[in-house]
Structures are given as structure tokens and as C-alpha cells.
């Protein structure tokens, strides 16, 4: 078993996600919001956030993966699972677990924008701003985190630890 140090507790996550839900509900008052949850890591955060949003919400899922060449500057990612519904004219918000280099999200936001939503926003639970190599506009952030390998609340290490109810760091 790996040693895991708690970085953000379950209580802190719950409090911050409530705040984000209230803020988003205010910002989109009178509208409907179409959430796009990025599989697999974004799903845990999506469920918790969606429960705190008080305006009407619909949810779809997308799964993307990089081509494995981490240093690729093209930023092109592979669509493993596409959306089920079209997003033309909708107020769309992408929900992600973490923005790191920004490679995945900069590409995803670009292709979603081409599908002509009314508005397109990005909400991430975690951000590692100092790691950014591909610029991406983040509209809502839960927490900025240091440049450490994070697990829990959807984030995995070799597919493990997604189910931890807190955000942790693996001690090596
Ligand atoms: P990007 O570098 O911004 O494209 O990050 C892409 C993906 O890498 C994220 O959506 C996560 O799935 C994964 N990732 C980045 N940093 C971490 C981390 O600290 N722990 C676990 N997964 C991470
Ligand atoms: Mg991810």
C-alpha cells in the first residue's frame, strides 16, 4: 500500500463545492446549464457539483486520451467517447478533475467551441497553474494545488485511488 497524505479534506472539498454550486447558480440564473463531465476523473466532482446547482441541469459525458506523446506541442487528443447530445445553442460547462499542462483541455475546448454552443465555460476542481504549457481559460476553480502527484476524488494513480473521499498526495 502507498502512504497517502491528506492535502484537501472531505470537509474542505464539500464546503468549496457548495460555494462553487452557489456561484454557478447565480451566474447562470434564469438559464439552463448543460454539463459535460470528462471521464473518468471528472465524474466524482461532477456529481457533487451538480447536486449543489439549483438551476436546471443536464449532463453528458466525454472521454478523451492523449496519444501518449506527452511532449507533443500539437495538443491533439484522442476522443475515446464522444457526447451523446449535440450542444448547438446550449450554455455548456465542461467539468474536469484537474488542469495540469492544459494540453487536454485546450484541445477539448477548441473542438467543443467549433460545435457552436451559446456559451462555453470550464470548471475544474483542481488547477496546477505553474505546470501550464498550453494556455486554457479556466472559469471556475475549486483549489490551486502544488506541483505534486495528486490522487483521490476521481484522480488516479494507475487507475487506483479514484474513490478516496479526499484529495491526497502519494508519499514516496
Ligand atoms: P493536462 O496535462 O492538463 O492535459 O492533464 C491531463 C490529465 O492528466 C488530467 O485530466 C488528469 O487525468 C491527469 N493528471 C494531471 N495531473 C495529475 C495528478 O496530479 N494526478 C492524477 N492525474 C493527473
Ligand atoms: Mg482527467
Image (cartoon, grey):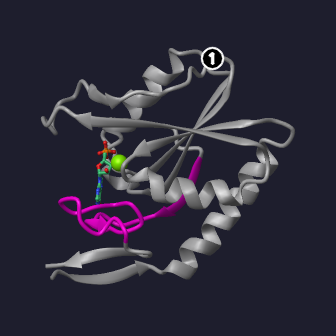
Q: Which residue was labeled with disc 1?
A: 88
Q: In the shown orientation, is residue 156 left or right of residue 62?
A: left
Q: In the shown orientation, is residue 48 left or right of residue 136?
A: right
81 lies above or below 38: above
Q: Position of residue 32 (x, y in %)?
A: 76, 36
In this rendered view, identify the residue nearer to me: 128 or 104. Answer: 104
Q: Position of residue 167 (x, y in %)?
A: 40, 72
- Residue at the spot 55% in from the left edge and 24% down from the top edge: 85
Q: Position of residue 145 (x, y in %)?
A: 40, 65
| Magenta stretch in the rendered image | 140-163
> Residue 49's image quarter?
bottom right
Q: Main secondary structure of the magenta part?
A: loop
Q: In the shown orientation, is residue 126 left or right of residue 71?
A: right
In this rendered view, identify the residue nearer to me: 168 or 141. Answer: 168
Q: In the shown orientation, is residue 38 left or right of residue 132?
A: right
Q: Residue 99 magenta-drawn?
A: no
In this rendered view, identify the residue nearer to me: 73 or 48. Answer: 48
- Location of the N terminus by quadrant is bottom left
Q: Residue furthest right?
A: 30
Q: Residue 157 magenta-drawn?
A: yes
**Helix or strand or loop: what does disc 1 sit on?**
loop
Q: Residues within 10 Å of mark 1 (few under 14, many from 20)?
A: some
Amino acid at each position: 500500500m502507498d502512504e497517502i497524505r491528506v492535502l484537501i479534506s472531505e470537509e474542505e472539498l464539500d464546503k468549496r463545492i457548495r460555494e462553487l454550486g452557489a456561484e454557478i447558480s447565480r451566474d447562470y440564473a434564469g438559464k439552463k446549464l448543460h454539463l459535460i463531465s470528462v471521464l473518468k476523473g471528472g465524474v466524482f466532482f461532477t456529481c457533487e457539483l451538480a447536486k449543489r446547482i439549483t438551476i436546471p441541469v443536464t449532463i453528458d459525458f466525454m472521454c478523451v486520451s492523449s496519444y501518449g506523446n506527452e511532449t507533443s506541442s500539437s495538443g491533439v487528443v484522442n476522443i475515446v467517447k464522444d457526447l451523446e447530445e449535440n450542444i448547438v445553442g446550449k450554455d455548456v460547462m465542461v467539468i474536469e478533475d484537474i488542469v495540469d499542462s492544459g494540453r487536454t483541455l485546450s484541445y477539448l475546448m477548441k473542438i467543443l467551441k467549433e460545435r457552436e454552443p451559446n456559451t462555453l465555460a470550464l470548471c475544474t476542481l483542481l488547477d496546477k497553474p505553474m505546470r501550464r504549457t498550453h494556455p486554457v481559460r479556466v472559469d471556475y476553480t475549486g483549489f490551486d494545488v502544488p506541483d505534486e502527484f495528486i490522487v483521490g476524488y476521481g484522480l488516479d494513480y494507475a487507475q487506483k485511488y479514484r474513490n478516496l473521499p479526499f484529495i491526497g498526495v502519494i508519499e514516496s
